[in-house]
Amino acid sequence: MEIQIPDDLKPGDKVLVSACLVGEEVLWDGGHDLNSPLLAALKEAGAEIVPVCPEMLGGLPCPRPAAEPPRGDGRDVLAGRVPVLGVEDGSDMTAEFLEGAWRVVEIAAKEGARFAFLNERSPSCGVRQCHSGGGVAEGPGVATAALEAAGVRVLPGRD
């Protein structure tokens, strides 16, 4: 994946990055998705990385059960049209996903972050695609939808 750093990213800018992409073991299964080229490109651009994990910020444990909306994307969850449910047992995790999304928006505001690089296909962080309905759907995850609604430009941190 070629890393696309925005032209208007200035040295010293704070940038949100999915914590799993910086190597923190926060994925649902306890793993990470370290993306060294992304980190190197952000460092070269002079950005200050602010790691975030919406699901952990929303109070979910690690590891945690896999969860996704039964249909739709993060915009549908934010609008209250669909819940976020555990894949195995159907447990409702909507409140935790929403709490995490709004906490990430608060962090972006507090840090003055105009950009975020988030983990593609995540039900929280997906940028162009997110897990939904037992597959991958077009559209953002819950945290990405909330950040975009708040005016933060969200870019995929991996393919």
Image (cartoon, grey):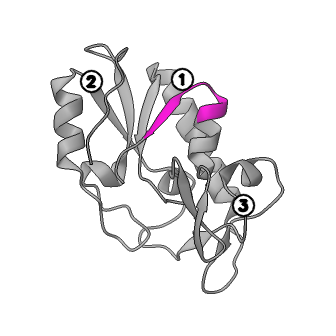
Q: Magenta residues?
A: 148-155
- On the picture, is 112 further left or further right than 73? left
Residue drawn 35% across and 49% down?
19
Q: Mark 3, residues whose alpha carbon is within 10 Å: few (<14), some, or many (≥20)?
A: many
Residue position marked by numbered label 3 in the rendering: 72
The x, y position of residue 20, in whole percent, is 33, 55
* C-alpha distance separating marks 1 and 2: 16 Å
Q: Which mark is residue 47?
A: 2
Q: What element carries label 1?
A: helix
| Distance (Cα) linking label 2 and label 3 | 33 Å
Residue 40 image point, x, y percent: 16, 36
How busy is the neighbourhood of tag 1: few (under 14 within 10 Å), some, or many (20 plus)?
A: some
Observer-nearest of 130 and 100: 130
Which quadrant of the structure image shows residue 25? bottom left
- Is 82 displayed left or right of 54 in the figure? right
Amino acid type indicated by mark 3: Gly
Amino acid type shown at disc 1: Ala
Instruction: Determine if the magenta segment contains residue 128.
Output: no
Q: Work out which residue is located at the far right of the displayed protein and give it.
A: 81
Whole-percent x, y for residue 42 in the image:
24, 30
Looking at marks 2 and 3 on the same chain, the residue that comes earlier in the sequence is marked by 2
Taking the spot 28% from the left edge, 26% from the top edge, the residue there is: 48
Q: Give the residue drawn at x 60%, y 33%.
A: 148
Tell me if 56 is positioned left or right of 43 in this view: right
Residue topped by disc 1: 109
**Vertical arrangement, residue 127 with respect to residue 20, above or below:** above
Secondary structure under badge 2?
loop
Say whether marks 2 and 3 touch (CB < 8 Å): no
Sequence-first disc among 3 and 1: 3
The answer to whether the residue labelled 3 contacts the one labelled 1, judged by CB atoms less than 8 Å apart, is no
* First-in-chain label (1 vs 2): 2
Residue 118 image-quadrant placement: top left
